Amino acid sequence: MLTQFAIRLICGMSLVWCVMPRSEVTSGFFRIQKLVALGLSVLAFMAIGPAPVAEGAEPVLSAEIVRWISIGLATMSFLGSVMWTLERRAAGARFAFGIAIVSLITVVLSSVPSVGFLTLKGNLTWLTELAVAAVSGATVGGMLLGHWYLTTPTMSTTPLNRVNWFLACVAGGRLIFGVITLGMFWPFGSEGTTTSGATSWTATHTIWLMLEWLGGILGPLAVSFMVVRILRYKNTQSATGVLFVGVILAFIGEMTGALLRHELQLPL
């Protein structure tokens, strides 16, 4: 689970680098971001192990392949940090897009088997994984960008606004995927009713679902709305504090959602 968490976070953060106006942010921010991605890549490499999956449900990318991908992401992150340190912004941006592409493909192909792309459930699974990654990455990226305004207070608020709108969009997408999944697979029965997943629905799953929705979907949506209002007054410090709360909520939602998806084999 730690490996999946790290890869998803790298994916989400790298998507933030791609959508934000990089020309309006100083190079030091991206240098530190690449070092964060380097640390997450090492964590993914060290924590990887054989994941228990149902027979016939093995994802396209095995654990061993993900291990080598983690090494590649670490290498690209290190080289990217060097480029940003040397003010080679164009080269640094290319590494950023490379990390985004590799991590995105890894998140998709490590979440579903090859036959999953032919089913609605399988496609909902990888779309949900991407949405979860984007929500976590946007909250972390936005929070770290907000802290960067302490070192460069004259920087435009446009980058932080762009990241915040990205958070709102991906959280909204996460909400749509969640509603579709609940509409298709919700048991609508008493405790113990068998679902379409690998086990039966219990009260514990209900608690996890509530935590996932409050922390991983509704919480980030509320945070993005609050940040929009705060940034009207150019108060980046208050916006950063709100985004820090969003990081905690997103992580709670991501971890409980991972438990649900693992136990029920549903794209919740």
Image: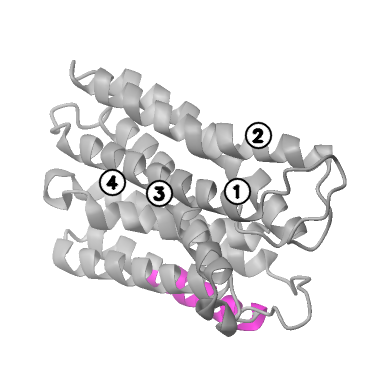
Number of residues whose C-alpha sits closer than 10 Å to that of mark 3, classed few (under 14), some (14–19) or many (20 or more): many
Q: Which mark is residue 182?
A: 1
Judged left or right of residue 54, residue 139 is: left
Number of residues whose C-alpha sits closer than 10 Å to that of mark 2, classed few (under 14), some (14–19) or many (20 or more): some
Judged left or right of residue 114, residue 102 is: left
Q: Earlier in the sequence, mark 2 or mark 3?
A: 3
Whole-percent x, y for residue 199 in the image: 83, 58
Disc 1 to disc 2, C-alpha distance: 12 Å
SS state under label 4? helix
In this view, the residue farthest toward the right is 192
Disc 4 to disc 2, C-alpha distance: 35 Å
Disc 4 to disc 1, C-alpha distance: 39 Å
The amino acid type, in three-letter code, at marker 3 is: Gly
Question: At 24% across and 36% down in the image, what residue appears?
Answer: 160
Q: Which mark is residue 173?
A: 3
- Above or below — where is 130 with respect to 207? below
Residue under label 4, please give it.
29
Residue 146 in sight from this viewpoint? yes
Front residue of 179 and 66: 179
Whole-percent x, y for residue 225 in the image: 33, 26
The amino acid type, in three-letter code, at marker 2 is: Met
Q: Nearer the viewer, mark 4 or mark 3?
A: 3
The amino acid type, in three-letter code, at marker 4 is: Phe
Quarter residue 66 falls in: bottom right
Q: Are marks 4 and 1 in contact (CB under 8 Å)?
A: no
Number of residues whose C-alpha sits closer than 10 Å to that of mark 4, classed few (under 14), some (14–19) or many (20 or more): some
Residue under label 2, please give it.
210
Quarter residue 190 falls in: top right
Disc 3 to disc 1, C-alpha distance: 14 Å
Question: At 35% across and 31% down in the image, what residue appears?
Answer: 224
Segment tinted magenta in the rendering: 63-76
Q: Earlier in the sequence, mark 1 or mark 2?
A: 1
